[in-house]
Amino acid sequence: MAKQIHFNKMPDDERQLITLKIVDSICSFLQLFISPVIARRLISAILIIAGVRSSEITRLTGLCERSVRNLKNQLVTGNTDGLFEVNGGRGRKSKFKDIESQIVEEIEKGNYQTLQQIADMVNDKFDINVSIMAVSRLLKKTKSAS
């Protein structure tokens, strides 16, 4: 039988590798039941409670320093209501936000054959410079809405 070495007496690189494998295995198991974001957050919360440094938590779980810091603050203040909520990103605001219906009306009135013609019309009439991909997304969005 091979000689067993206590975990604390192993070289640092071996301990880190084993720890990383364990955290990864636990995260994979949790992802069978909950979303990956929540799984990483849960593991991070456990590591925070165990007293692991933020930089180590970031390395082990893949959460950024800011997320770990916010999570730590939530745990300290006892404000854990939002711990298991996943909020969508804010994203970029649409250039068409206020004039979408006007653009669609103009497209229906006019005789536009290509996306480039529509993009040029939006630039001329509404003074908004848009790409043909943005026009394509607008058309897909309005067709699904109607």
Image (cartoon, rainbow, N blue to C red):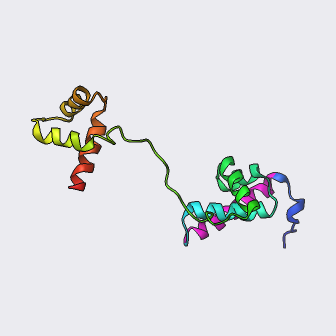
Q: Residue at x 46, y 45 (%)?
A: 91
Q: Position of residue 131 (x, y in %)?
A: 30, 32
Q: Is residue 23 magenta?
A: yes
Q: Is residue 140 magenta?
A: no
Q: To which quarter of the image does residue 96 belong? A: top left
Magenta segment range? 13-32
Q: To which quarter of the image does residue 126 belong? A: top left
The dominant secondary structure in magenta is: helix
Figure disc tally: 0
Q: Residue at x 80, y 57 (%)?
A: 52
Q: Is residue 16 above or below residue 136?
A: below
Instruction: Identify the image quadrant of the N terminus.
Output: bottom right
Q: To which quarter of the image does residue 9 belong? A: bottom right
Q: Position of residue 21 (x, y in %)?
A: 69, 61
Residue placed most toward the observer, 20 or 57: 57
Q: Position of residue 29 (x, y in %)?
A: 60, 70
Q: Residue at x 74, y 56 (%)?
A: 17
Q: Is residue 133 left or right of residue 78?
A: left
Q: Position of residue 18 (x, y in %)?
A: 75, 60
Q: Residue furthest right?
A: 9
Q: Is residue 36 left or right of residue 14?
A: left
Residue placed most toward the observer, 144 or 2: 144
Residue placed most toward the observer, 145 or 134: 145
Instruction: Identify the image quadrant of the C terminus.
Output: bottom left
Q: Residue at x 48, y 48 (%)?
A: 90
Q: Is residue 61 left or right of residue 91?
A: right
Q: Is residue 88 above or below residue 22?
A: above
